[in-house]
Amino acid sequence: MTTNRPYALRAVPGLYASKPGIQVAVQTSHKASDEDLQFFQQLGVEWVMLGIDDPALHSVEHYKQFAARFAAYGLQIYRIANHAVHNVPEITLNLPGRDEKVAELIQFIRDLGAAGIRYHTYAHMGNGIWSTGRTTRRGGMSARTLDIKNATGRWGSETFTGDLTHGRAYTEDELWENYEYMIRKVAPVAEEAGVYIGIHPDDPPVYALGGIPRCIFGNFAGYKRAMDIADSPNIGVCLCVGCWLE
């Protein structure tokens, strides 16, 4: 895409496959077998989002090893999921340990860049992704369902319930201040490392859950303001079509 477009309208440089158009990817674990990778190759998939749930495997050396293993099957890792460094209340709500979490996020971005992985998804929710349960949809597939009156938030091993998940109600101004504090530290590192960060919409994008507003990434105006604050070609939008549809 042309470089004179606004930051949020640019695609991540280098994230294109052998054919133009929409890119098809799969989500898999670092525990994926050779048979899994061969199956992805047979499907014609070229991109992988890799989930790593072992903290000991989050290092440049391991990222390079994973990239080499996947490349043997014609697969490129476009993203590594690390739940420890985004969507965390320490950053979103300015809880004790915030600076340590920001430093951990910065190191993760540097490690991605050093391993040649150019994209990271960041989310800025303070009390997880909220759902009610599962339901059966088209063709018998299992899908999330949401009844806001009976929903529960989850992130990693944490569960969030009730009217005040963190003991009090937070203001929109607090969330904006905490976002700005984080992004001004992270954006220069992302530019230096050559890593592009797509910010995921609040899930679900409702006004407030558990006393925490979802004012930044729950609507277009919030996204625009957040991109203006970041003021970086490396900070943009994660186009989660489900959340954007909501």
Image (cartoon, helix red, strand yellow):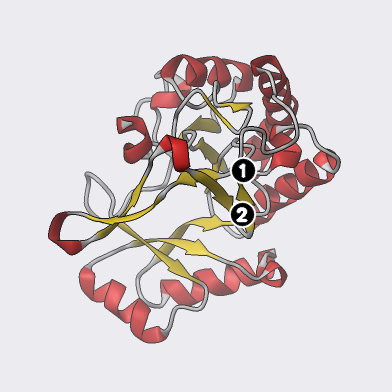
Q: Is residue 106 left or right of residue 202?
A: right
Closer to us: 177 or 156? 156
> Is residue 26 positioned above or below 105 on the image?
below
Whether residue 174 can be seen here: yes
Residue drawn 22% across the image and 70% down it = 43
Residue 117: image x %, image y %? Answer: 54, 55
- Crowding around mark 1 (Cα neighbors within 10 Å: few <14, some 14 to 19, many 20+) is many
- Rendered view: 164 above or below 21: above
Of residues 127 and 239, the one drawn nearer to the viewer in this rendering = 127
Asked if residue 170 lies left or right of residue 210, the reply is right
In the rendered image, which residue does mark 2 sit on?
83
Point 20% across, 54% down: residue? 137
- Measured as percent of width and height from the top left, residue 71 is found at 43, 72
Mark 1 falls on what kind of element?
loop
The type of residue carrying mark 2 is His
Query: In the picture, residue 227 is in which quadrant?
Result: top right
Query: Going by the image, does 207 lie left or right of 59?
Result: left
Which amino acid type is marked by label 1? Asn
Count of marks overlaid on the render: 2
**Is 71 in front, or is 109?**
109
Task: Report the residue at 49% width, 34% height from top.
Answer: 202
The location of residue 194, given as percent across then percent down, is: 59, 43
Residue 155 in the image: state x and y as whole percent: 59, 52
Spatial CA distance of label 2 from label 1 is 7 Å
